[in-house]
Image (cartoon, rainbow, N blue to C red):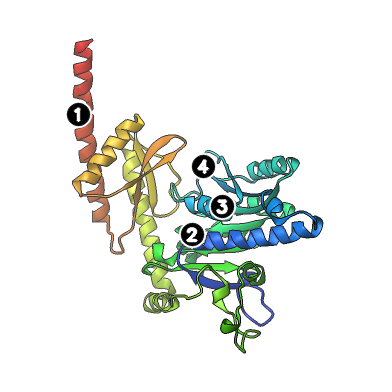
Amino acid sequence: MIGLPEDFLCLSDKSKGGGVIQGSASDCILVNLLAARHSAIKALKQEKPFVEEGTLLSSLMAYCSKEAHSSVEKAAMIGFVKLRILDTDEKFQLRGDTLEKAMEEDKSMGLTPFFVAATLGTTSCSSFDPISEIGPVCERFGVWLHVDAAYAGSALICPEFQHLLRGIEYAMSFNMNPNKWMLVNFDCSTMWVKDRFKLTQALVVDPLYLQHSFSDKSIDYRHWGIPLSRRFRSLKLWFVIRKYGVEGLQKYIREHVRLAKKFESLVRKDERFIVANQVHFGLVCFRLKGSNNLNQKLLSSINASGKLHMVPASLSGDYVIRFCICARNATDADIIHAWDVITMFTEELLEVVKKEEIVVRSLV
């Protein structure tokens, strides 16, 4: 449905790829970082057989953009590896030349680049790292590229959005969350790897009491993550796909994109506001022209009213308000109502600010 290359799929006994359902994108990022770490230390051990593994571990460097999800930072903490958080361009994307420069700098300092987390649909503003640029850099340095598409991955079921996957053939692993935007209840995070054996080598512990006679024929998912026991998540995903069909799910995604574009147009028509991101899918980041404090007051008053709930983000130091289409049955009327609420609180806030300025001027 989402157009992944066959390398990621387990289609025959000779296939190396495969997929699994994890609890969250955080789990996916962590296990792939651990697999990349294991693979990197194994390669370094062959080059430097007399160097202790702890010393080799201290040289490993992972990379992500400053717009990547905080779970990348947490995975690096758990994995005891260094993480370099890189700046993005004006569209909040991690560019290939930025990554290449950072890796060259680290290599010259004796460090070993081993893992990159790229994002399709960042949490803050739904920006997209160009995998077609990042991938060749990772390939040249022998680095494991993981692609996190937790939110935006669901939209890839629509052919018109699959161009965002360009360069995915360079990735070693990929994850998306049907529980975010594909009508599946939490938890359900799908993950694919190009070489499942590199993943399981980092996680296999095989005591006698867990061994069985089908180990050479079956895929044993206890080796694909942290927990030994696993929840049975596939049925709920299957039922959603069965009920709606691919076309039904595509219609659902496209409708949310249309509604977001409608909200964006309302914001752009009001000269008091700025749209702060490229609106690809269901997320619109906007702000009042003015200070961060002004925008923070606006969001606080709206959320306190209970009429809407929105979450902020910081983009290049600017406090922005994130409006996301989330409700399954959202309509044009909901968008108009939301904008009416926002403009009502905006007018009230600007009136208060105006009065405060008059008072200050009179005191001066």
Using the image as rendered, state which of residue 228 and residue 288 is in the foreground: 228
Of callouts 3 and 2, the N-terminal one: 2
**Residue corresponding to mark 1:** 351
Residue drawn at (59%, 52%), measured in percent from left and top? 80
Report helix, strand or loop for mark 3.
helix
**Residue corresponding to mark 2:** 26
Crowd band around label 4 with a 10 angstrom C-alpha radius: few (<14), some (14–19), many (20+)? some
Instruction: Residue lying at the far bottom in this picture: please name it.
Output: 213
Assign the C terminus to one quadrant of the image: top left
Of callouts 1 and 2, the N-terminal one: 2
Q: Whole-Å distance between the Cαs marked 1 and 4?
A: 33 Å
**Residue corresponding to mark 4:** 91
Of callouts 3 and 1, the N-terminal one: 3
Q: Is there CB contact under 8 Å for labels 1 and 2?
A: no
Instruction: Between label 3 and label 1, give the one nearer the viewer.
Output: 3
Report helix, strand or loop for mark 1.
helix
Report helix, strand or loop for mark 4.
loop
Q: Whole-Å distance between the Cαs marked 3 and 4?
A: 26 Å
Residue drawn at (60%, 63%), measured in percent from left and top? 173
Amino acid type assigned to the residue bearing label 4 in the image? Lys
Amino acid type assigned to the residue bearing label 1 in the image? Glu
Q: Is there CB contact under 8 Å for labels 3 and 4?
A: no
Instruction: Between label 3 and label 4, give the one nearer the viewer.
Output: 3
Q: Whole-Å distance between the Cαs marked 2 and 4?
A: 24 Å
Of callouts 3 and 4, the N-terminal one: 3
Instruction: Residue lying at the far top in this picture: please name it.
Output: 364
